[in-house]
Image (cartoon, rainbow, N blue to C red):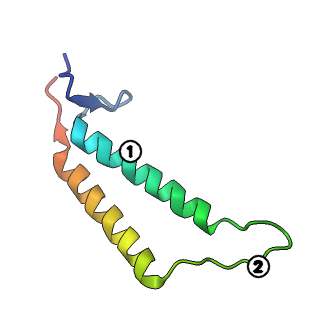
Amino acid sequence: MQSANSAAHPASGCCALPATALKALTQTRDQLRLLAQLTEPQGEGSPDVVYLSAQALAQCFDRLADDLDRIAEAVSPSEL
């Protein structure tokens, strides 16, 4: 039986993901979707320009990498 503070990947059943790691994974997904939306072309007539500084983009990628590191560290083999 799984604890209330973790979620396992339903297909594999090989890992336990603590609630904090699941939250970080969800936030990472949302950040990637935001970056995708910010870089989508806005239409035929609009210029294909992204208004993000290199520093802001680097900070986003660095934060995403840190979040993924924490998630990977939190994953532990599940007890069957």
Q: Earlier in the sequence, mark 2 or mark 1?
A: 1
- Name the residue furthest bottom: 54
Q: Position of residue 59 (x, y in %)?
A: 36, 74
Camera-nearest label, 2 or 1: 2
Query: Which SS class for mark 2?
Result: loop
Q: Residue 44 carries which label?
A: none
Q: 8 above or below 1?
A: below
- Name the residue furthest top: 1
Q: Give amino acid for label 1.
A: Thr
Write the residue at 66% across / 65% down: 40
Write the residue at 52% across / 58% down: 34
Instruction: Report whether residue 38 is seen.
Output: yes
Write the residue at 20% across / 21% down: 2
Q: Position of residue 74 (x, y in %)?
A: 18, 46
Residue linked to disc 1 = 26
Q: How far apart are marks 2 and 1 (CA)?
A: 32 Å
Query: Which SS class for mark 1?
Result: helix
Q: 42 above or below 1?
A: below
Q: In this view, does 4 lie to the left or right of 47?
A: left
Write the residue at 59% across / 65% down: 38
Q: 15 above or below 74?
A: above
- Name the residue furthest left: 79
| Label 1 Cα crowd, 10 Å radius (few <14 / some 14-19 / many 20+) | few
Q: Where is residue 51 in the image (x, y as percent from the top left)?
A: 59, 78
Q: In this view, does 4 lie to the left or right of 37?
A: left
Q: Where is residue 63 in the image (x, y as percent from the top left)?
A: 32, 65
Residue linked to disc 2 = 47
Seen from the viewer's position, the closer of residues 19 and 15 is 19
